[in-house]
Image (cartoon, rainbow, N blue to C red):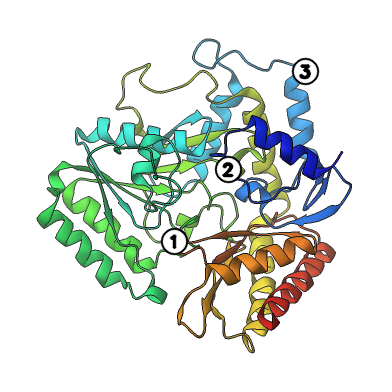
Amino acid sequence: MKNSAISERKNQSISRGVGMTTQIYADRAENSEIWDVEGRRYIDFSSGIAVVNTGHRHPKVIEAVKAQLDRFTHTCHQVVPYESYVRLAERLNGMLPGKFDKKTIFVTTGAEAVENAIKIARNATGRPAVIAFAGGFHGRTFMGMALTGKVVPYKVGFGAMPADVFHAPFPVALHGVTVADSLAALDRLFKADVDPARVAAIIVEPVQGEGGFYEAPRDFMTALRKICDQHGMLLIADEVQTGFARTGKMFAMDHHEVAPDITTMAKSLAGGFPLSAVTGRAEIMDAPNPGGLGGTYGGSPTGVAAAHAVLDVIEEEKLCDRANTLGARLKQRLQSIRDDTPEIVDIRGPGFMNAVEFNDVKKGLPSAEIANAVRLKALDKGLILLTCGVYGNVIRFLAPITIQDGVMNEALDILESAIREVRTA
């Protein structure tokens, strides 16, 4: 079987709207490695977009799912509930930041978690409006698209977005937007576009994912908390990509001195099985009437079983510490390359949620061409990378936190070789 043959079949049978970063068709995967249908091995620095923080097919996750399959696969929690759902909610309630009582619901995808967070916020406050940030990504459903601060490719051609969604600039010093600029823009928003008394919530990624791996400054997050408290708004932290040890702490908001009212989670929560969650202040989460929240597949038994195993692995294998160690190694290598590669304008990211940003030196502008060329060169050498950012000029690194030291060293050598070859070319 050939990748090219499957790709031709794909072109005939699957909507072109489903974009694909590579034309590698997976046959099997283990920890940080993937083998395609032609038998070629790749090092995976994407983790299915931050889904397998605990690695592909972690033995404990697989064991937990197999055990669940031997018991039951689906009852719909809203019809015949199960204790594992309750126990997972208890675990998340206990580990998320904030010294207040919390409650949780489980759904299926990150976009679904965001949709439900907005529903809950509107219900709890009785207000319709929501504020998000430029560069943020919150999903491909209609509310997710409306909240997302990036037009191409997410909003193009899909018509009118839901109303009462407003955007403010996210502070990115590298691109000339300071914390003061962002806060001033919020103030102008309240004066020109929306009465703060109509705003249900502000939603923010503690580290922007698709937007370019820009970390929210501490004073910015503190200011958002103050604004929300002042005007009776809720603060929603979108931890879909940042959660579960990726940033060197269990949640990215653990890096800040303030707690959100609501947190959305997905991706690595269940180590490759579809599961997402919304956790928040108990009184807020209890605002909707029974039946207002849920979903047929929400909190699937297999996903819940996998999530319990993921939380155990993170604790037992000290993956928060491991993320900090791996991120430091990656940034150190990138810094050594930067010394004679002026196209690298920034290296950043907490824990093992890291990125490198490229500019065209002659033009002094962001260069998607360089970033994509590095991605393709690395792929040709057996390393899977992802690009991101509003300008497409950022490479983000999302390898499994369980990656073996030897494989990590091999990946860093490939990365350095790819960057240097692209610059020479």
- 174 w.r.t. 243: above or below: below
Q: Residue at x 54, y 40 (%)?
A: 266
Element type at mark 3: loop
Q: Earlier in the sequence, mark 1 or mark 3?
A: 3
Q: Which mark is residue 297?
A: none
Could you tell whether 74 is left or right of 67 in the image?
Answer: left
Question: Measured from the top left, where is residue 156 in percent x and y?
Answer: 39, 45
User: Residue type at mark 2?
Assistant: Lys
Residue 251 placement (x, y as % from top left)? 52, 52
- Tell me if mark 2 has few (under 14), some (14-19) or many (20+) residues whose alpha carbon lies within 10 angstroms of its own: many
Frontmost residue, 153 versus 317: 153
User: How many numbered discs, if any?
Assistant: 3
Query: Which residue sits at x=38%, y=48%?
Result: 148
Q: Secondary structure at mark 2?
A: helix
Asked if 44 appears above or below 346 in the picture, the reply is: above
Q: Earlier in the sequence, mark 1 or mark 2?
A: 2
- CB within 8 Å, label 2 to label 3: no
Q: Is residue 280 left or right of residue 195?
A: right
Residue 70: percent from left, percent from top: 77, 18
Rendered residue at 60%/13% (across/down): 75
| Left or right placement of residue 108 versus residue 280 in this view | right
Q: Say which of 413 and 288 sits in front.
A: 413
Query: Is any part of residue 416 visible from this angle?
Result: yes
Q: Find disc 1 in the rendering and name its residue.
A: 390
What is the three-letter code of the residue carrying label 3?
Asp
| Residue placed most toward the observer, 20 or 340 | 20
Residue 278 at least partly seen = no
Q: Which residue is mark 2?
A: 267
Report the residue marked by disc 3.
Answer: 70
Mark 1 or 2: in front is 1
Residue type at mark 1? Answer: Val
Q: Quadrant of residue 201?
A: top left
